[in-house]
Image (tube, rainbow, N blue to C red):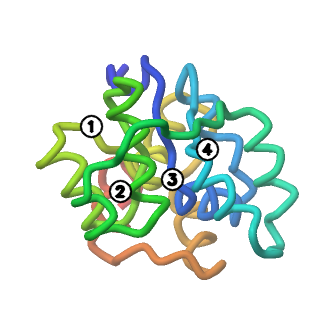
Amino acid sequence: MNPIFEAPVVCNAGPLIGLARVNLAWLPFRLFPEVIVPEEVRVELLVKESPDRSQLIKALELARIHQCHGKPDPLLHTELDSGEAAVIATALELGVSAVVLDEKKARRIAAHIYGINVKGTAGLLVEAKRRDLIQAVKPCLYGMIQGGYFLGPNLVSSCLDAAGES
């Protein structure tokens, strides 16, 4: 098993929303021993009505909600939205070595500037298939896309390759 899945993770809103579109909002909580959601992300998930709201509420009940106490690096709030900045700041504050983020810029900043391990929604699906938590990745990816969640064609292709479904 990939060691990233053996420790707590800090999760952003996007991956939970994408997974909820295909009824898999529970998935990160089965893949990681603990899922931490920053307060800013919790608010972002609950601020507006969505067809996935009940799933997201259930997922948040499983999460450890964290309010950052320190002053965040100004780079985070200059370059990222508040949720992405809070995910990275929470990981740094708690000493958590991995985050779940989908947005490219946030992933690059987390990995290259702060040395944080990054997983995305597609990577969670591949791991879920490896663990027999889902039967196939392809219908999940296409269901997310049909539900309005953006996943680039190169990402979809590489994910399907990694899952042995190309």
Image quadrant where one finds the N terminus: top left
Label 1 crowd (10 A; few <14 / some 14-19 / many >=20): some
Direction from residue 135 to residue 89 in the image, left or right: left
Task: Tell me which amino acid carries mark 3.
Answer: Asn
SS for callout 3: loop
Numbered disc total: 4
Label 2 packing within 10 angstroms: few (<14), some (14-19), many (20+): many
- Which of the 4 quarters of the picture holds residue 58? top right
Q: Nearer the viewer, mark 4 or mark 3?
A: 3
Tell me the kind of residue under disc 2: Cys
- Disc 4: CA contacts within 10 A as few (<14), some (14-19) or many (>=20): few
Q: CA distance from mark 1 to mark 4?
A: 26 Å
Residue bearing the label numbered 3: 12
- Give the number of the mark in front: 1 or 4: 1
Mark 4: secondary structure? loop
Q: What residue is disc 2 on?
A: 159
The amino acid at mark 4 is: Gln
Mark before the other along the chain sequence, 3 or 2: 3
The image position of residue 83, as x and y in percent, is 49, 59
Q: Earlier in the sequence, mark 1 or mark 4?
A: 1
Q: Nearer the viewer, mark 2 or mark 1?
A: 1
Q: Is residue 4 left or right of residue 150?
A: left
State yes or no: discs 3 and 1 in contact (Cβ < 8 Å). Answer: no
In the rendered structure, which disc, 2 or 1, sits on the residue that comes first in sequence?
A: 1
92 up-or-down from 34: above or below: below
The answer to whether 111 is drawn above or below residue 105 in the figure is above
**Residues under labels 4 and 3: Cα distance?**
25 Å
Task: For mark 2, give the secondary structure.
Answer: helix
Residue labelled with disc 1: 117
